[in-house]
Amino acid sequence: MYLTTKNGRKILLNTEAEEAAINAGIVADPDTFEVTGAQMKKMRGRPVGSNKTLVHIRLDNDLLERFKATGSGWQTRMNDALRKVVT
C-alpha cells in the first residue's frame, strides 16, 4: 500500500507481516528499543549546541532554483558559498 504525501510523493508502506518482523527484531535485540512518541518529540529540531539560526530571506527565483537543482544538501552548499564571500 502507498501513502501519498502533501507534495505528491508516494511512500511504500510495510505490510503487516513486515511490521511484525521488524517489531520482533526490536524486541529480540537487547541493544535496541522502540522510541516513544514523547522521546521522538524531544529529538526534533536542531541538536543542542548548534550554532545555526533559522532565518527567513527572500532570494531571486533563478538563484534559489540553481542551488535546489544540485540536489539534497543545497542549503549547506548555499551556506558554504555565502561563507566564501564574507571570509
Image (spheres, helix red, strand yellow):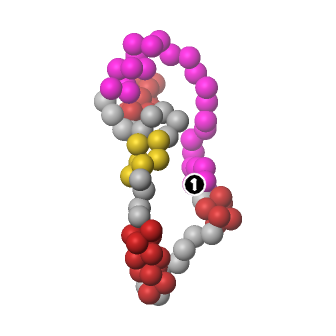
Q: Is residue 40 above or below residue 59?
A: below
**Looking at the rendering, which quadrant does residue 36 occupy?**
bottom right
Q: Which residues lie in the magenta part?
A: 44-69
- Is residue 38 left or right of 85 when viewed as pictured? right
In terms of secondary structure, what is the magenta stretch mainly?
loop
Residue drawn at 36 percent across, 38 percent down? 72
- Is residue 65 left or right of 6 when viewed as pictured? left
Residue 73 covered by magenta stretch: no
Q: As drawn, which residue projects farthest toward the right?
A: 38
Q: Nearer the viewer, residue 65 or 59?
A: 65
The residue where tag 1 is placed is 47
**Looking at the rendering, which quadrant does residue 22 occupy?**
bottom left
Q: Position of residue 83 (x, y in %)?
A: 43, 30
Q: Is residue 82 above or below residue 18?
A: above
Q: Quadrant of the C terminus?
A: top left
Residue 57 shows in the view = yes
Q: Is residue 51 above or below residue 34?
A: above
The amino acid beneath tag 1 is Pro
Q: Position of residue 33 (x, y in %)?
A: 53, 78
Residue drawn at 43 percent across, 85 percent down? 29
Residue drawn at 60 percent across, 50 percent down? 45
Residue 22 shows in the view = no
**Looking at the rendering, which quadrant does residue 9 occupy?**
top left
Q: Residues within 10 Å of mark 1 (few under 14, many from 20)?
A: few
